[in-house]
Amino acid sequence: MKVVKVTEKKQIDAFHQLPYKIYKNDTNWIPPLRMMVESIFDPQKNNALSTGDARRWVIYNDNNELVGRIAAFYTESYSLQAGQPTGGLGFFECIDDQKVAGLMFDTARDWLKKTGMEAMDGPINLGENFFNWGLLVEVFMPQTFGMNYHPKYYRNLWENYGFQVYYKQFSYQLNITSPDLPERFWKIAAWVAKKPTFKFEHFTFKDQEKYIADFLKIHEQAWKKHDNYKPIDPQDLRDMIKQSKTMLEEEFIWYVYHEGEPIGFFMMIPDANQLFKYFWDGKMNLFRALKLMYLKKKKVVNRCRVIVMGVVPKFQKSGIESGIFYHLRQVLLRKDWYDEMELSWVGDFNPKMISLFEAVGGKKAITHVTLRYLFDREQEFQRLPIIHD
């Protein structure tokens, strides 16, 4: 077999071609846009690379057939958060062959060792965990935008190499406008939403700098004590908004304030994959961009995905999460073509958020896992600790 570092157009093309071989008979898979994947590895477009580095490889067998691909990377914020310097693996695609997978994992491990890493997590993204995070292991259905989809045999390839489950990631499904949802929850939600001590407002593009700053304040307070906390660079948020502006709905992003201070946020996005599925080769041009806008106006997107929410510790028992859901429900009663919501994802280390998703009426639908491999095979493996506060 031959390992080839991805540096030139020929290897970049091969990197993007392989998934079509892997998923050619799988109607659940929706190809990501090539330009979005490439932007992840572009230092000019991905601010995470300002404190790290990345490598990509493609693998050919002895018959010069493309059989695998993988990316390895590290960033300062991620590598220092988990007890030992830890890098990441992502964009893994492979035929059902343990030798091929093992060669790719070895290649990534050896490069990460040279950078000073002592462990590697995967499959994860080079950036925020909103997108491209985790290995799909339960319920194989068309993925929402930003969620990973994989063949069933991938789990064996990872675990046979020695990866272990660091944490599980659960996705819930919900129709927030359904009359069958828990009545008690919605009564409380309406009461909280109308309390004069709280102010609920949705995001606007014209005031995005204000909302980015408020997001960062809430995020730091809500997660800084967690073992997997890492600060978010405001430029990452600007980049995400810029890249997603044509798809974002201002009324899908909510903030809560108390005496003028931001104390909670919520972000949901329309499922762009319901549009991208029409572009099977994953490429975008002006004509397709116009078609995408046309399809959006035709309201072919009926599903949305909750990607992140947070509340500062002082108000985490005040019920403001339910107040956000109340306001969101009013939006979706007006935009009634949206009748599916995916709450994705919540980690098994976060029982409080799991309880909220279940209280609102969410049903557990999909499970991903994030796996870890310790380079020192004698070191004791520990799962990500449960959040108790």
Image (tube, rainbow, N blue to C red):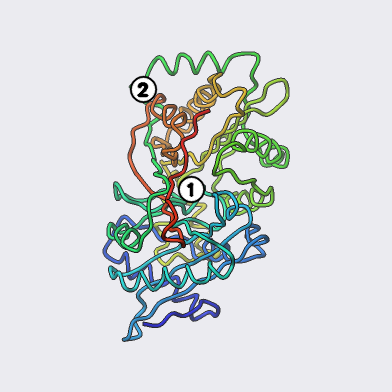
Residue type, numbered disc 2: Leu
Q: What element carries label 2?
A: loop
Q: Position of residue 218 (x, y in %)?
A: 64, 34
Could you say whether the residue bearing mark 1 is in a helix, strand or loop?
A: helix
Q: Mark 2 points at which residue?
A: 181
Q: Residue 81 carries which label?
A: none
Q: Identify the image quadrant of the N terminus.
A: bottom left
The label number, if any, that marks residue 296 in the structure image = 1
Q: Quick one: 370 or 60, which is closer to the camera?
A: 370
Pinpoint residue 314: horizontal percent, then vertical percent: 62, 23
Horizontal side of residue 310 vs 177, given as left or right: right
Left or right of 223 on screen, residue 140 = left
Q: Where is residue 231 in the image (x, y as percent from the top left)?
A: 64, 45
Q: Quadrant of residue 354?
A: top left
Q: Nearer the viewer, mark 2 or mark 1?
A: 2
- Dot 2 or dot 1: first in sequence order is 2
- Front residue of 44 and 218: 218
Q: Which of 46 and 88 is in front in this view?
A: 88
Callout 2 environment at 10 Å: few (<14), some (14 to 19), or many (20+)?
Answer: some
> Which residue is outermost to the bottom?
63
The answer to whether 159 appears left or right of 308 in the picture is: left
Q: Which residue corresponds to the image point at 66% horizontal and 58% vertical from the top-left? A: 47
Residue type, label 1: Lys
- The crowding category of the residue bearing disc 1, from other C-alpha atoms within 10 Å (few below 14, some 14 to 19, many at least 20), is some
* Above/below status of 318 relative to 310: above
Identify which residue is drawn at 65% across, 38% down. 220
Q: Where is residue 91 in the image (x, y as percent from the top left)?
A: 45, 63
How many angstroms separate mark 2 from mark 1 (CA)? Answer: 28 Å
